[in-house]
């Protein structure tokens, strides 16, 4: 990525790897950037989306036409920086309006060197991605953009998301502790594969002291904190490359320690159990995805950000080296596996984001399930 100062009046062009282009205006930093083009269907929560490490190396297209209305504050980021590679909006807010706003979204993108584009038909772009699938993309601004063939060649030279090993690029390099709020009840070792700040906070609210460990943490590192439970976080990249987290999770399963995984952690559990993973055509991203909890029959509106899924049979239970497992949750839009639950060991996972800082909060009960597993193990 190359960037320079803001230039809202600078022309910009978005070039997809299949040759389709969209022309608009620069938004945020001026320069060029590359990544995988994906779309997010949330109408709110853009600040949480931008700072979610799972979006590393992705160019996010917002389907909501008006973006930036509430500006940017210092309370809602899910990490210390913006992780998206680029940002695409139709009609950016001219003036942010919110009592917590400290600066405009345009200013924040520029300050962090994030190249974006505005003024394009995001509806047409989203429909194109739904039909053709997520693909590589480049955004170019502040330069001569007449030679689209040369820009297309740059886009096609970018590595694809399939086969990308990215969790180590976004995870913490040093262990840190999020203390329990109130009385401490449990200790959890959380393997950071791209964790969001709200996740350990949700656990801390339930009396859990969370030790966040690097993605490179070994089994010995995990058990050095004497955990009552182990958590594997969300994160970016292709789960087929995550051999180290899979090996650590298998060791946790062998010991029978209560285990909970979300998003990337769900895919890691799938692999640890012997299932494969595959890339979705365009993935699930946004805060309005319907999922059924098959253990209760209830339907939840949930927050998602994943382009890969677990290839597990919906009709179960299935036999694994660690006992039987069932698909506990399923997406009602396309029957994609959204959760796994072991029947013979205290372990489960979901593909979506139950911490849901920007909402909805339908899935917050999953943290209580994790607490129940740890209570049962202690008893």
Image (tube, grey):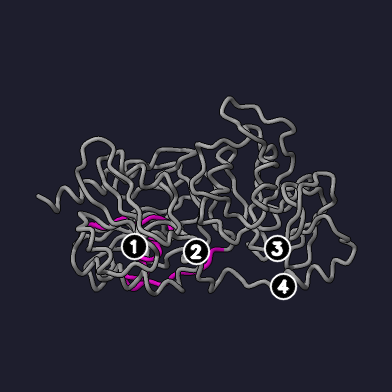
Q: How many marks?
A: 4
Q: Which residue is mark 1?
A: 315
Q: Position of residue 147 (x, y in %)?
A: 88, 67
N-term mark: 1 or 2: 2
Distance from label 3 to label 1 (Cα)?
38 Å
Distance from label 3 to label 4 (Cα)?
8 Å
N-term mark: 2 or 3: 3
SS of the residue under disc 2 = strand
Q: Residue drawn at (72%, 53%), measured in percent from left and top?
A: 125
Is 374 above or below relative to 288? Answer: below
Q: Position of residue 151 (x, y in %)?
A: 80, 67
Q: Which residue is mark 3?
A: 137
Q: Which residue is mark 2?
A: 308
Magenta region: which residues?
A: 258-280
Does the magenta-highlighted stretch encompass residue 227? no
SS of the residue under disc 4 = helix
Residue 188 visible in the picture: yes
Q: Residue drawn at (70%, 42%), measured in percent from left and top?
A: 106
Q: Residue drawn at (29%, 44%), measured in percent from left and top?
A: 179
N-term mark: 3 or 4: 3
Left or right, 241 with reference to 81 = left
Q: Residue drawn at (78%, 66%), measured in percent from left and top?
A: 19
Tell me the mark number nearer the camera, choosing from 1 and 2: 2
SS of the residue under disc 3 = strand
């Amino acid at each position: 990525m190359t960037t320079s100062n803001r230039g809202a009046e600078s022309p910009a062009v978005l070039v997809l790897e299949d040759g389709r282009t969209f022309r608009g205006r620069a938004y945020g930093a001026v320069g060029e950037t590359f990544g995988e083009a994906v779309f997010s269907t949330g109408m709110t929560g853009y600040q949480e989306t931008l700072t979610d490490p799972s979006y590393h190396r992705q160019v996010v297209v917002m389907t909501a036409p008006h973006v930036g209305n509430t500006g940017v504050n210092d309370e809602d980021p899910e990490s210390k920086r913006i992780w998206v590679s680029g940002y695409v909006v139709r009609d950016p807010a001219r003036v942010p309006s919110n009592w917590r706003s400290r600066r405009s979204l345009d200013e924040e993108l520029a300050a962090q060197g994030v190249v974006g584009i505005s003024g394009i038909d995001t509806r047409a772009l989203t429909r194109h991605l739904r039909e053709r699938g997520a693909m590589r993309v480049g955004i170019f601004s502040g330069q001569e953009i007449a030679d689209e063939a040369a820009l297309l060649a740059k886009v096609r030279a970018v590595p694809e998301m399939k086969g990308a090993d990215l969790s180590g690029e976004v995870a913490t390099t040093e262990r840190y502790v999020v203390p329990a709020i109130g009385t401490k009840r449990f200790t959890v070792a959380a393997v950071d594969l791209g964790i969001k700040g709200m996740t350990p906070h949700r656990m801390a609210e339930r009396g859990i002291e969370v030790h966040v460990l690097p993605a490179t943490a070994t089994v010995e590192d995990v058990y050095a904190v004497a955990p009552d439970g182990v958590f594997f976080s969300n994160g970016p990249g292709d789960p087929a490359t995550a051999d180290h987290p899979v090996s650590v999770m298998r060791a946790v399963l062998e010991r029978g320690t209560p285990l909970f995984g979300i998003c990337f952690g769900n895919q890691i559990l799938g692999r640890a159990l012997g299932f494969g993973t595959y890339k979705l055509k365009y993935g699930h991203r946004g805060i309005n995805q319907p999922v059924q909890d098959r253990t209760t029959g209830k339907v939840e509106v949930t927050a998602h950000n994943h382009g890969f899924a677990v290839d597990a049979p919906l009709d179960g239970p299935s036999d694994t080296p660690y006992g039987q497992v069932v698909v506990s949750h399923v997406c009602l839009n396309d029957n994609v596996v959204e959760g796994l639950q072991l029947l013979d060991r205290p372990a489960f996972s979901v593909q979506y984001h139950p911490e849901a800082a920007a909402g909805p909060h339908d899935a917050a009960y999953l943290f209580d399930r994790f607490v129940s597993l740890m209570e049962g193990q202690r008893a």
